Amino acid sequence: MAERTARKPVTVTKFVDKKAKGEKIAVLTAYDYFTARFLDNAGADALLVGDSVGMVVYGEKNTHSVTMEMMLAHTRAVAKADPAALVIGDMPYMSYQPSLKTAVINAGRFVSEAGAESVKLEGGIEMAPTIKRIVECGIPVMGHLGMTPQSVHRFGGARVQGRTDASRQYLLESAQALQEAGAFGIVLELMQSDTATEITKAIAIPTIGIGAGKHCDGQVLVINDITGMYDIFQPKFVRRYADLASVIEKAATEFVADVKSGGYPTDDESFS
Ligand code: KIV
């Protein structure tokens, strides 16, 4: 295992300051202890334990079946790696929408039971009171605007947002409302680049884009997408840096062949 780099922890304050310093922010999703270590060594500023885990780890079609228990287990594994990167726990479907009380209790569980340093939740201006209440309880919250996957049915599919004046206006007003509510950053997902640029200029907290163009303050991608571990589909905005699916398949094929031929194990790989 590679030796770990000694990095200073990326606190929420440091994360936010990066925007003022003009330093781009790199965020990746992580769902387990070992991947969290690799991504931390790579210098990621934050590790988002995304509810995308439902799709890229559990093979679900969308994120709707992801539960608090699943998210707490994966967040605990990532936090256990003790990364310098900021750990953000993603609040799953219906863990914060029903009431402020539900939202606060579940946000608190991410911190007290799983070791998250912050949480993320989806939604625009209508979610501002929820963000405000969680922040008042001492938990940093990241917002998430644009094509928010938990509302995919309302959007009628994964459609690029911000194309109409009304959509653009809603996103801009929402970004401002989330900032006023105390969010420390906002993910902008699948959004027309001009709209993302306008939002990024209008608010003081960092915008983290995913399919939202190059003018966001930072970018986030799903680790299984960039490593080629998720091969169901590849959105236009994903850049694939590795093809781990082939690497794993090749290793497994060689193992199967060695076992079948009697080539594994050798005496050196056995105990006398
Ligand atoms: O769940 C997730 O991975 C996310 C990112 C795609 C932003 O919310």
Image (cartoon, rainbow, N blue to C red):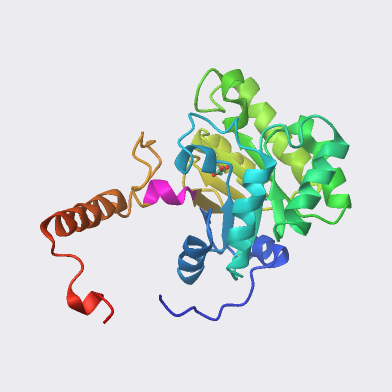
Image location (x, y in percent) of residue 188: 58, 41
Task: Check residue 222 for magenta coloring.
Answer: yes
Image location (x, y in percent) of residue 265: 21, 68
Please state if 177 lies on the left or on the right of 215 as rendered. right
Regarding ligand 1, which quadrant of the image does it lie in? top right
Please state if 23 lies on the left or on the right of 246 as rendered. right
| Residue lying farthest to the left in this orientation | 261
Q: Residue at x 63, y 41 (%)?
A: 199
Q: Which quarter of the image is occupied by the C terminus?
A: bottom left
Question: 200 and 183: which one is in front?
Answer: 183
User: What kind of secondary structure does the magenta stretch mostly adopt?
Assistant: helix
Please state if 248 lies on the left or on the right of 221 as rendered. left
Task: Check residue 192 for magenta coloring.
Answer: no
| Residue lying farthest to the front in this orientation | 272
Q: Which stretch is magenta?
A: 221-226
Q: Residue at x 47, y 61 (%)?
A: 35
Q: Which residue is drawn at 18% across and 77% down?
A: 267
Q: How many numbered badges does the structure rendering display? A: 0
Image location (x, y in percent) of residue 11: 69, 67
Q: Residue at x 61, y 37 (%)?
A: 66
Is residue 201 visible to the viewer in this orientation of the structure? no
